Amino acid sequence: MTGHRITVVGAGFAGLTALRMLRRQDREAELTLVAPVAALHYLPGSIWIPAGKRQRQDLVLPLDNFLKRQRIRFHQAHAAGLSADGRVLHTDAGDVENDGLILASGARFMRGLAGLEHAIIPCDGIAAGEAIRDRLARLEGGTLCFGFGTNPEEPIAMRGGPVFEFVFGIDTLLRRQRRRDKFRLVFFSRSQTPGQRLGERAVEMILEEMRRRKIQAVLGEKLQRIEPGAVVLERTRIDADLILFMPGLTGPAWLDNTPLPRSPGGLVQGDAQCRVPGFSCTYVAGDGGSFPGPDWMPKQAHQADLQAEVAARNLLCALAGNPVSETFKSELMCIIDLLDRGLLVTRYEDRVRALRPTIFAHWAKAAFEKRYLRRYR
């Protein structure tokens, strides 16, 4: 291997996995990470912030030791554009030249819904989890509303699992605090079968768990707007004291300043090898990419990791002048945490498995978090 200059954009799951794989495969490559901060924000753990099981310092991990250990240069900046051939990344702190590029800057939430500012977006950073915690603590009772949407141009560009976790986690928390009877919990969805990518059996379990916990489900109505203190659906208006809503996903705004091919939903177009069509030695991985695959392919950390590993290996093959052929697997591995138990769902090609909530799944989710973060300490 030679000292190829490889730039990775994004310090999330896909970006860091790509860097680890690149360094494992090529000890001489000149690796550069471009991101606003040298820290990993472990957003899956934000579901535990309202209950006090996690705090900001538990979920924001500085990457200084990791970057030094792996001999990775850090360029602190926001990506701002890309040259026509992909070999120069423009940032708000100067240009970064590369021989190979992996785009892993994630996706952003669509914010066009009228009144979205009156809701909290659950996974919109650690601060969102803290806001939910603080608002809950101040409330003495009332109605709590939970929902998620999708990208109408690309229905796969959505993330609903965390919303289920906040619904069930907050229900469990209120029961522990012996004040559940003072609250009405309402889940709303345009779909009659929310969470379809998890499989039919998982949807049945989720809706059954809602019924058991007396969580009202308003299904089959399109969200029209959010007002101060209310969710307005096609036929139903729900007065609410706290609204959690997860919009659909699209590509980050900086992509508008690039010649990169985009999907109908605004994500970077990638092929089965994670290559960006029309751009040599340019790859994409994670939530910000649009890939061929089944309609249940998730936007989640595990899938991002699988894509990032393939992107890194294929990029190194391309830089060495070798054929690129490795494709990523579509896999869904999800634990919907209920704060005291977890519902495990796995999906591989035509195999779907959903297990009823157990304490072991809850422990497994916490153990995975600990193991994952250890890699970057």
Image: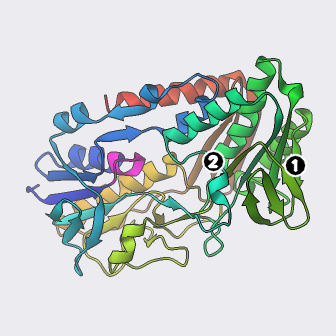
Classify residue 265 as left or right of residue 220.
left
Q: Is residue 246 visible?
A: no
Which residue is at 51% across, 39% downward? 127
- Judged from the image, the secondary structure of the residue bearing numbered disc 1 is strand
Amino acid carrying label 2: it is Ile
Q: Is residue 201 above or below residue 225?
A: above
Q: Amino acid at mark 1?
A: Ala
Nearest the eye: 373 or 220: 220
Residue span colored magenta: 10-16
Q: Is residue 320 above or below residue 304?
A: below
Q: Residue at x 74, y 64 (%)?
A: 225
Residue 46 placement (x, y as % from top left): 55, 35
Q: Is residue 120 above or below residue 360?
A: below
Q: Is 79 left or right of 288, judged from the image as shown?
A: left
Q: Nearer the viewer, mark 2 or mark 1?
A: 2
What is the number of the mark on residue 217? 1
